[in-house]
Every structure is written in structure tokens, then in C-alpha cells.
Amino acid sequence: MLATILVAGSFLASENLAGIINPFSLTLLRFIGAALILFPIVFYNPRWRKSVLLTLPRAMIISLFFSVFFICFFEALNTTTALNTGTLYTLVPLITALLSMLAFREGITIKQIVVYFLGVSGTAWVIFNGQLDLLLSFSLNKGDLIFMAGIFSMCCYSISMKFLYRNDEMVVLVFCILVGGSLWMTLALLFSGQPLQWGLLQGQLLYDMAYLVIGATLATVYIYQKTTIVLGPARVNAYIYLNPALVAVLLLLIDGASMPMAVVPGILISSIATVILQKGHVQENTVES
């Protein structure tokens, strides 16, 4: 829940930074900034320092999936809308659950599939602001197909976080993931030919950037890595259904933006779906043990 709230807050910070510097450079700065914070912590400890080279190859694979998601997302926005990407992103929990069946032999029932689609409908309700005409006008384009590739990569990112875990020191693994992400995004920035533009970050924008580095990158990567190992990718990603609702609540609390009553049913539906999925996984684990 904490990680989900932090991610929801990143939408507000990212909105303030949008159009100031290009998104590839923004993502690169997030990775580098978070890695630099962990650098002295990791290298001060001799045992952690020695394990970096052993951990880095697997972390490079994990961070590749994470970076590909951002690359596909930014590329998709050239030919699609934020509304479309937000709607398609609700498929992440279901696809992750299906991939978990293959990777970890986790079962999935018809009831759970129904609840996953219930979560999709609830978050879509919030995204479309309860307007049926917007939902009916939804159609896929080239950008949406690119973003679907990004969604698949995000699901693989969640799967790889557990699949490639080898009882690593969590701080070291997170550090290596951030280093890997920095390297992949550097390559993406070079191929895109876009400038860094970091000098444009001034005043209040520095606070927004600090939140993205510490709260939305360093903290969330650590929390997701730790919880995915314990709870599993499918259960962790089920919290995605709460993202639009939490963004609406944060906008209300921080900016005083009114919450349209039309989105309340969608918030309730997505919340109920998340609770049912979590309880379902708990019951399955109890039976297995």
C-alpha cells in the first residue's frame, strides 16, 4: 500500500515536470539520483561491496524490463493518449497473474479472472471519469500496440524480481537494479538524440524531482523488490487497481481539486476487487501450508 501511494504521488510530481525536460532524461535522472544515494551505503560495507559484481548481471536483466517499459511508454505517447495508456495499464495485474502460472506454477481460478476484469472495469471507470461516451469511443492505434509491448515488459519485470532472486542482500540488489536502469536509459537517451536539460530544474521543480528520485524510485523499487519475493508478482500488481483512485484522493488532499461523484463507483469497484484478490491469495497460501 505504501508503494502504491508513493507511485500515485509520482503522477502529481511528473505532471509538474512534464514539458520541462524530455521524459528519457527525466527517467535517467531518477535512476542515477537513486543509485547515488545508495552508493556510499553499499560500498561502505565490504561484504555488500564484494557482492555487487555477482548481483549486477541478474540486476541488468531485471532493470532491462523496467527500462523497456518506460521507453515503450514514452514512444507510445507520440501516437496515443494518456487516457489510452492509463486504460491499457489496468491489464498488468491479469497478465502478470497469467505469466506467474508459467513461471511459478501459481494457479488461477475462474473467480480470480472475473475479479481481475472487475478491477479493470473499476479503474477504467475512474480513468474515463464515469463517461460512457469516452469509453465507447476508445480504440487502439499504433501507439497503443507499442504500449502493450511495454505492459508485457512491466509484467516480466515483476516476474523477474522473484525469478532471479538468489537470497541477495536487498540493498545491493536494489542498487544494482538502479545502476542497470541508469545504463539502459543512457543508451535510450543516446539513440533518441535528446538532450539532458537537467539545468532547467529550478525552484519548486527540484522538490518534485527529489520526490521522484527518493519516493517514487528508490523507495518503491526497494519495496516492490522485497514484497514481490514474499507475496509474489500477481498479488503485488493487484494493487495497481487502486492507482487512479489514490491519484484522485491525493489531488483532493494536496491541490484541493474536487473529486467528481461520477468516479466514486469506480473507486469502490477497484477497491473491492483489490481486497478480494488479496484475500484469495491469502486463503490459497493458507491451504498450501
Image (spheres, grey):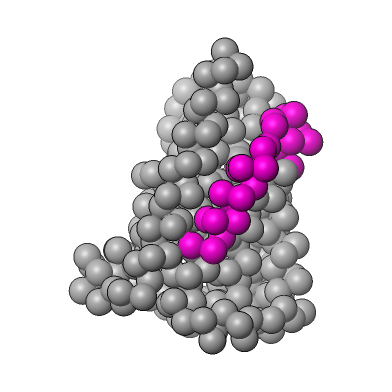
Examine the image and state in which quarter residue 71 appears. bottom right
Q: Main secondary structure of the magenta part?
A: helix
Q: Quadrant of the C terminus?
A: top right
Residue 90, position as x, y percentages in the image = 58, 60
Q: Kindly tell me whether residue 287 is visible in this rendering.
A: yes
| Residue at the extreme top of the image, as rendered | 289
Q: From what the image shows, is residue 231 above or below residue 209?
A: above
Residue displayed at 42% across by 65% down:
266
Q: Position of residue 262 (x, y in %)?
A: 36, 75
Left or right of residue 65, residue 210 in this image? left
Query: Which quadrant is home to the N terminus?
Result: top left
Residue closest to the eye, 65 or 24: 65
Height in image: 218 above or below 184?
above
Q: Would you say residue 141 sits in the magenta stretch?
A: no
Q: Residue 112 in magenta?
A: yes
Query: Residue 245, percent across and down?
Result: 38, 62
Q: Residue at x 45, y 27 (%)?
A: 44
Residue at the image position 44 percent from the left and 57 percent from the top: 269
Residue 225 appears in the rendering:
no
Q: Is residue 172 above or below residue 193?
A: above
Report the magenta residues as a range: 99-122
